[in-house]
Image (cartoon, rainbow, N blue to C red):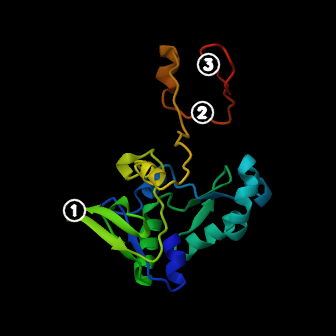
Amino acid sequence: MAAEVLVEAGIKVDLYDAMPSVGRKFLMAGKGGMNISHAESYDKFLSRYGSRCSCIKPLLDEFTPQALCEWIHSLGIDTFIGSSGRVFPTDMKAAPLLRAWLHRLRVAGVNFYMRHRWLGWIENDNTALKFATPDGEHKIKVDAVVIALGGGSWPQLGSTGAWVPLFAQRGVLVAPLKPSNCGFDVVWSKHFSSRFSGQPLKSVCVSFSDAKGVNIC
């Protein structure tokens, strides 16, 4: 998205990715039906961000959920609103959207460099970068950098969290990475688990206590 905004402004853009192809986490998201947004009222949508609402609001004011849908439509992808109010591509897949997006970026002049794993900066220059490539280490000088590296949740898709110490070495404050999902072991009966194992739990409230019986959540 950053590449698209920049290239439309007439800026030369080179995009480097550690993986053999771009958008792998994007494609993984598509396996669940590719939920794009929600059709609920804007105020209700904002309320979903809880205590972060005031920080997120200026961003969403600039690029609303409706604007996101219009952007997807501009790529030739139709959408529909499901019974839950969620917005999906008509074919429920991420690949067609990604293909159309990458085609538009390439036509606009964005250059893609695959299998370029970022190793950090060169000495004290914020615009001199090091990459590990199949042909050895490359050093690249640029005018400006947009860094988008994900968390540490999907190493097989490129999100290894290896960038955290690189930032720390430069004195950049990084909040410790924490999981957004977690699992629990529950001793269900064979009768129950044989019928419901793997099924999602929806519209439920869950609470649990630590080993001392103190309520955690």
Q: Earlier in the sequence, mark 1 or mark 2?
A: 1
Q: Earlier in the sequence, mark 2 or mark 3?
A: 2
The residue positioned 53% from the left and 42% from the top of the image is 176
Q: Is residue 20 visible?
A: yes
40 lies left or right of 163: right
On residue 198, the disc is none
Q: CA distance from mark 1 to mark 3?
A: 48 Å
Q: Which residue is mark 1?
A: 134
Where 134 sits versus 205, above or below?
below
Amino acid at pointer 3: Asp
Label 2: how many Cα within 10 Å (few below 14, some 14–19, many 20+): few
Depth check: 145 or 193 in front? Answer: 145
Label 1: how many Cα within 10 Å (few below 14, some 14–19, many 20+): few
Q: Residue furthest bottom?
A: 10
Tell me the quadrant of the picture where the C terminus can be found: top right
Secondary element under disc 2, as helix, strand or loop, is loop
Q: Position of residue 61 (x, y in %)?
A: 73, 67
Secondary element under disc 1, as helix, strand or loop, is loop
On residue 210, the disc is 3
Q: Which residue is mark 2?
A: 201
Amino acid at pointer 1: Pro
Depth check: 207 or 16 in front? Answer: 16
Q: Earlier in the sequence, mark 1 or mark 3?
A: 1
Front position among marks 2 and 3: 3
Q: Position of residue 1 (x, y in %)?
A: 52, 69
Q: Position of residue 213 (x, y in %)?
A: 66, 14
